[in-house]
Structure formats: structure tokens, C-alpha cells
Image (tube, rainbow, N blue to C red):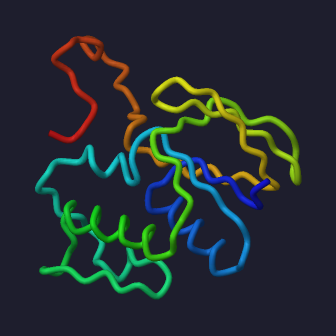
Amino acid sequence: MADIAVIGAGPCGIAVGVAAREAGVSCVLFDRGAITQAMMDHPTYVTYFSGPEKLEIADLPFTTAGDKPTRREALRYYRKVAAYYALDVRQYEEVTAVEGTEGDFLLRTRTRMGEERVQRARSVVIATGYYDTPRKLDAPGAELAKVHYYFT
């Protein structure tokens, strides 16, 4: 049984994993994609609005070539953070159900190969982000194939 199970391995999920590691509690992160999957879906040459000092996790400096980090720099940084802290990240393993109560949760998961698994945890943190769940327009034509809900 893990002390904490985190659903989502983006920047917030990674930050929870690092905080857990520093506190000496066990933590497992699940993501239906790769680490920072939503960021991988951002445009290749995007530059973020926040400076690197606002995106840093723990005491690991986030150095960038310019004033603001690029997508490529952010992806590299967050993956290095996960590796540095040896986080238990279950990539391509989607959480399909959460049952139980505080102190005794059961998470049901499915790997991309279709294998069904279970993980018990004392606490669950939901850090699924927002990028891949757009707010759709309520307007005529919003359902047309040429309408997209992501950066281009």
C-alpha cells in the first residue's frame, strides 16, 4: 500500500511526488500518457508566460536560455526532476476507478496493453491538469470537423 497515489504526472503531480519523497512517505504517480503528456501536446516551439523561477520544484534550479522557458526546456526539466528524485511514475497506466475512503483507497488502473491492475493507497491526489479537457463552444458549427480545441 502506498501512502499517496497521484493521478497525473504533470508538473503538479511531480511536485506532489517530490514533496512526498522529501517527507519520507511512499508515493506512486499514474498517468494515462507519458510524464508531462499534456505539455508534449503543446506546440513544439511555444514559450511559456511564467519565468523558470515560478515553475521550479523543490531546490532544483530551472535554467533556461532566455527569460521564459520553452516547451522543450520544460519537458526536459520536469523529466529530470522525476528522475533525480527517483519518483515511481506509472506511465501509460490510466486510473479507471477510485473506491474507498480516507486511509484506505483502491485504485483500478489499465495499462496501454490492456492489463488491469489495482493499487491501494492511504490518500489520493488528483492532479490531472486541464489542457486536454477543453471547454467547448456552445455555438453553431462548434461540432464541425474543422473546429479544433487545442493550440495550433
84 or 105, nearer to the observer: 84
- Image coordinates for residue 48, horizontal then vertical, percent: 24, 64
Q: In the picture, residue 95 is in which quadrant?
A: top right
Is 91 left, or right, of 117 in this rendering?
left
Q: Position of residue 110 (x, y in %)?
A: 57, 30
Question: Total label count?
Answer: 0
- Vertical order, 45 against 111 (above or below): below
Quadrant assignment, res 60: bottom left
Left or right of 73: which side holds 10? right
Q: Residue at x 71, y 78 (%)?
A: 24
- 72 lies above or below 98: below
Left or right of residue 23, residue 114 in this image: left
Left or right of 123 on screen, residue 51:
left
Give the residue at x 44% y 45%. Answer: 130
**Residue occupying the point 51% across, 75% down:** 85
Looking at this view, is 118 or 66 the one in front?
118
Quadrant for the C terminus in the image:
top left
Q: Nearer the viewer, residue 117 or 129?
A: 117
Residue 3 position in % (x across, y down): 77, 61
